[in-house]
Image (tube, grey):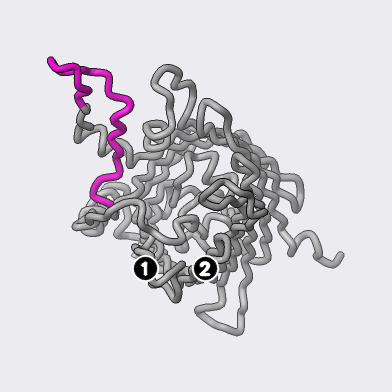
């Protein structure tokens, strides 16, 4: 099989692979109606530092990131055995996102022995509640959660994986629950640090919705990505295309239009096709100083377009971070610049428990 993947033939196969899977990936979808949209949020330092979306970046065998199976189930492998990770993501206004991930190889299960588990908990904190007249009704609580189990299979240069997850939402006494399936695949060069990936997230259905009259659409997301580290450079580059399920992800904000017609009316400026296309792109780079230390940076075009202030765009849409490994511990930090008002921080701690608790 590997003989088919000489450098020239590998790129030819890669092109045909992407030509095939990219057909008819874009469908129409009306925004603003999805339930349980929180399960598309980034949860750990690596993906946040790389721009908020990445399905192909992974370290060498001894430093495999257990959290990356959350982004692409196909990135799970035996090297993540007994790796435990805890990530905390602090948003604005006291909102926090907690994520737990663990990988284990259950040898008795045979081919399906390599499993990973993940748990996400998004807490909105206590919110003041008021009636229609403005009278205080006290505080209400809102939170959302998901639990997933992942398995991946490797077939030479190809890997495929799936995550089955249940997600729930509790918003001031209104509840919603759904069951979803994530499907992912990767094509990896046998010799070079080059990987392509495809992920289809959140294929499933609701068990219950907030109310009988609530509208619902799946929080589906389709992503295509690639990562490549040149042989003579200590940098791994990544590019990810996100939201391929939606025909148009651009919001034309009329408040940003400044052109007036002859009658003094605001002329809404149309968003170009190139602008609409580039909003799907997320770029990332990892500078690998050593196997125990590297830094990360990313740029999210969609985030910048949606959240900048025209008068003062600053560095909105950029993100950065790094990781430090000491023996059985790995500490990663990332900061995402969400708005001119401030950014958000993520802290991720990973333990290699098989080394930590290994008997002397």
From the image, give the main secondary structure of the stretch colored magenta. loop
**Tag 1, which secondary structure?**
loop
Q: Is residue 250 magenta?
A: yes
Identify the disc placed on residue 213. 1
Residue at horizontal 14 percent and vertical 17 percent from the top: 263
- From this viewpoint, is residue 333 visible? yes
Residue 327, how many percent across, how many down?
A: 76, 49
Identify the disc placed on residue 175. 2
- Would you say 271 lies left or right of 224 here? left
Q: Earlier in the sequence, mark 1 or mark 2?
A: 2
Q: In which quarter of the image is the N terminus?
A: bottom left
Instruction: Name the outermost residue toward the front.
Output: 133
- Would you say 85 lies left or right of 301 here? right
- From this viewpoint, is residue 157 visible? no
Residue at horizontal 38 percent and vertical 58 percent from the top: 34
Q: In which quarter of the image is the C terminus?
A: bottom right
Residue stretch in magenta: 246-267
| Residue in front for this viewpoint, 252 or 283 | 252
How dense is the environment of label 2, judged by Cα within 10 Å: few (below 14), some, or many (20 and up)? Answer: some
| Residue in front for this viewpoint, 158 or 6 | 158
**Tag 2, which secondary structure?**
strand
State the separation of the CA atoms marked 1 and 2. Answer: 13 Å
């Amino acid at each position: 099989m590997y003989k088919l993947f000489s450098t020239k033939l590998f790129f030819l196969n890669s092109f045909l692979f992407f030509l095939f899977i990219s057909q008819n990936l874009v469908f129409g979808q009306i925004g603003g109606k999805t339930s349980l949209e929180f399960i598309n949020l980034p949860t750990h330092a690596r993906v946040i530092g790389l721009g908020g979306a990445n399905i192909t970046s992974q370290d060498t065998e001894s430093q495999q990131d257990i959290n990356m199976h959350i982004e692409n189930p196909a990135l799970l492998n035996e090297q993540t055995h007994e790796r435990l990770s805890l990530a905390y993501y602090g948003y604005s206004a006291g909102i926090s996102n907690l994520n737990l991930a663990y990988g284990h190889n259950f040898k008795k299960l045979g081919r399906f022995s390599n499993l990973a588990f993940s748990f996400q908990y998004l807490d909105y904190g206590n919110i003041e509640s008021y009636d229609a007249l403005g009278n205080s009704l006290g505080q209400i609580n809102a939170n959302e959660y998901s639990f997933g189990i992942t398995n991946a299979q490797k077939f030479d240069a190809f890997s495929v994986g799936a995550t089955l997850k249940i997600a729930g939402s509790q918003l001031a006494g209104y509840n919603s629950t759904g069951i979803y399936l994530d499907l992912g695949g990767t094509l990896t060069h046998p010799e070079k640090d080059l990987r392509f990936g495809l992920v289809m997230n959140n294929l499933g259905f609701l068990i219950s919705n907030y109310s009988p009259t609530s509208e619902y659409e799946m929080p589906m997301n389709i992503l295509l990505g690639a990562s490549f580290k040149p042989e003579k450079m200590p940098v791994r580059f990544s590019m990810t295309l996100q939201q391929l399920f939606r025909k148009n992800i651009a919001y034309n904000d009329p408040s940003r239009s400044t052109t007036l017609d002859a009658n003094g009316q605001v002329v809404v400026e149309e968003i170009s096709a190139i602008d609409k296309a580039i909003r799907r792109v997320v770029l990332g780079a990892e500078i690998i100083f050593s196997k125990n230390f590297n830094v990360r940076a990313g740029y999210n075009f969609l985030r910048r377009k949606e959240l900048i202030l025209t008068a003062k765009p600053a560095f909105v849409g950029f993100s950065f971070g790094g990781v430090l490994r000491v023996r059985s511990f790995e500490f990663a930090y990332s900061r995402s610049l969400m708005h001119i008002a401030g950014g958000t921080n993520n802290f991720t701690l990973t333990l290699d428990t098989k080394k930590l608790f290994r008997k002397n």
